[in-house]
Image (cartoon, rainbow, N blue to C red):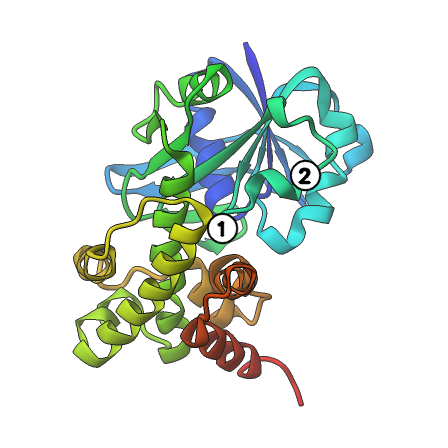
C-alpha cells in the first residue's frame, strides 16, 4: 500500500486526498491545521466521501512514500515544517502549487526527489472538509521516472494525469491563465466576467505580458494564447470562482506574487516591462491592505 501525505486541507488538497482514498490502494494522511471528521467532495458525477488519517501536529508525522504539498505558495514555511517527519530516504515530494517556481520553494529536498506539478482542477472549499469540484481536472508533470511514479497514483481516479516533455512551457501556459484571473478578484465576478469584451481585452493584455516574459525564460508560447485564455474562461462554468477571487472574498491572504507579481519580477530580470500585471497586483493589494 502506497503511503501518501497531503499537506493542506484546502480545495486542492482536500479533493486530491478524497480521490486518492477511494480505491483502497493508498493510505492517505491529511496534514491540516485543524482536526476534520471527514472529507466530502461534490463532483460533477455525485458526491464522494473519505476519512483519511488526519494529523495536526508535525511532530507526529512518520515517513511516507509521497508527500503532496498543496498549500498556498505563501504557506511554504508552514508546509516545510511537516517535511522532517514525513520525508524518508526514498520519499518524493510533489509540489502542487501555482506559479512557475515550484522547485525553488522547498530547497531542503533534493531536486531529484522533487516533482513540480501543474494542476487544473476547478474546486472551491465551502466549509472545512466540504468541497465543490467543478470538473475532473488535469495534472501535468515533467517526464522521467519520478513523474511516471506520480501520475500512477491517480490511475484509478477521473483526474487526467500525464507527463509532458516541455514542463517549462506548460507551467507558463498555466500562469497565463492564472494571471488573467485577477480580473475576477478585481471585479468581484466569477468566470462569466470574461463575456464583457472590455474585461476580456484586459485579460488579453495581462496574458501578452506573461507571454513576453515566459519566452525570455525559455517557454514556447504562441501569440494566440492571449485569445485562447479568454475563450477558455468563457467556456468555463459561468459561476466558477478562481482561488484568487475566493481568497479575496473570504478576506484571506492571496497568491498575488505567484500569479502576477512573478511576471513583473522575472520581467525585470530580462528588461521586459509588465505594467498591467503590476498595476492589477497593486490595486488588489490596496483593496485589502489598510492604509
The residue at the point 37 percent across, 59 percent down is 212
The residue at the point 38 percent across, 51 percent down is 215
**Residue 92, image x and y in percent?**
61, 22
Tell me if 159 is positioned left or right of 276 in this view: left
Residue corresponding to mark 1? 99
**Residue 84, image x and y in percent?**
78, 29
Would residue 139 be seen by someone viewing this image from the given angle?
yes
The N terminus lies in quadrant:
top right
**Residue 283, image x and y in percent?**
49, 82
Q: Secondary structure at mark 2?
A: loop
The residue at the point 77 percent across, 27 percent down is 85
Looking at the image, the residue that sits furthest to the front is: 271
The answer to whether the residue labelled 2 contacts the one labelled 1, judged by CB atoms less than 8 Å apart, is no
Residue 106, labelled with which disc? 2
The C terminus lies in quadrant:
bottom right
Residue 143 sits in quarter? top left
Q: Residue 187, relative to residue 82: is it above or below?
A: below
**Residue 118, image x and y in percent?**
42, 40
Nearest to the observer: residue 179 or residue 154: 179
User: Along the polypeptide, which appears first: circle 2 or circle 1?
Assistant: 1
Q: Residue 146, relative to residue 268: is it above or below?
A: above
Tell me if 181 is positioned left or right of 59 in this view: left
Tell me if 118 is positioned left or right of 285 in this view: left
Looking at the image, the residue that sits furthest to the top is: 1
Mark 2–mark 1 Cα distance, whole angstroms, equals: 14 Å
Residue 41 sits in quarter? top left
Amino acid at each position: 500500500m502506497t503511503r501518501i501525505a497531503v499537506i493542506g486541507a484546502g480545495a486542492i488538497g482536500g479533493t486530491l486526498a478524497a480521490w486518492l482514498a477511494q480505491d483502497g490502494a493508498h493510505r492517505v494522511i491529511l496534514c491540516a491545521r485543524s482536526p476534520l471528521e471527514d472529507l466530502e467532495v461534490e463532483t460533477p458525477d455525485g458526491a464522494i466521501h473519505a476519512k483519511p488519517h488526519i494529523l495536526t501536529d508535525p511532530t507526529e508525522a512518520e515517513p511516507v512514500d509521497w508527500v503532496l504539498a498543496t498549500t498556498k505558495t505563501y504557506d511554504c514555511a508552514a508546509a516545510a515544517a511537516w517535511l522532517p517527519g514525513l520525508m524518508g530516504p526514498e520519499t518524493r515530494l510533489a509540489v502542487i502549487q501555482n506559479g512557475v517556481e515550484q522547485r525553488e520553494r522547498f530547497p531542503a529536498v533534493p531536486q531529484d526527489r522533487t516533482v513540480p506539478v501543474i494542476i487544473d482542477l476547478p474546486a472551491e472549499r465551502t466549509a472545512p472538509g466540504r468541497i465543490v469540484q467543478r470538473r475532473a481536472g488535469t495534472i501535468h508533470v515533467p517526464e522521467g521516472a519520478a513523474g511516471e511514479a506520480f501520475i500512477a497514483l491517480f490511475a484509478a481516479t477521473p483526474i487526467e494525469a500525464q507527463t509532458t516533455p516541455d514542463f517549462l512551457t506548460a507551467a507558463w501556459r498555466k500562469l497565463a491563465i492564472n494571471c488573467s484571473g485577477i480580473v475576477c478578484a478585481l471585479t468581484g465576478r466569477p468566470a462569466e466576467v470574461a463575456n464583457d469584451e472590455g474585461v476580456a481585452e484586459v485579460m488579453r493584455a495581462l496574458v501578452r505580458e506573461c507571454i513576453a516574459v515566459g519566452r525570455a525564460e525559455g517557454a514556447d508560447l504562441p501569440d494566440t494564447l492571449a485569445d485562447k485564455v479568454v475563450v477558455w474562461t468563457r467556456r468555463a462554468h459561468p459561476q466558477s470562482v478562481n482561488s484568487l477571487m475566493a481568497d479575496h472574498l473570504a478576506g484571506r491572504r492571496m497568491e498575488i506574487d505567484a500569479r502576477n507579481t512573478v511576471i513583473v519580477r522575472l520581467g525585470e530580470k530580462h528588461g521586459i516591462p509588465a505594467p498591467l500585471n503590476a498595476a492589477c497586483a497593486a490595486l488588489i493589494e490596496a483593496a485589502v491592505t489598510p492604509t
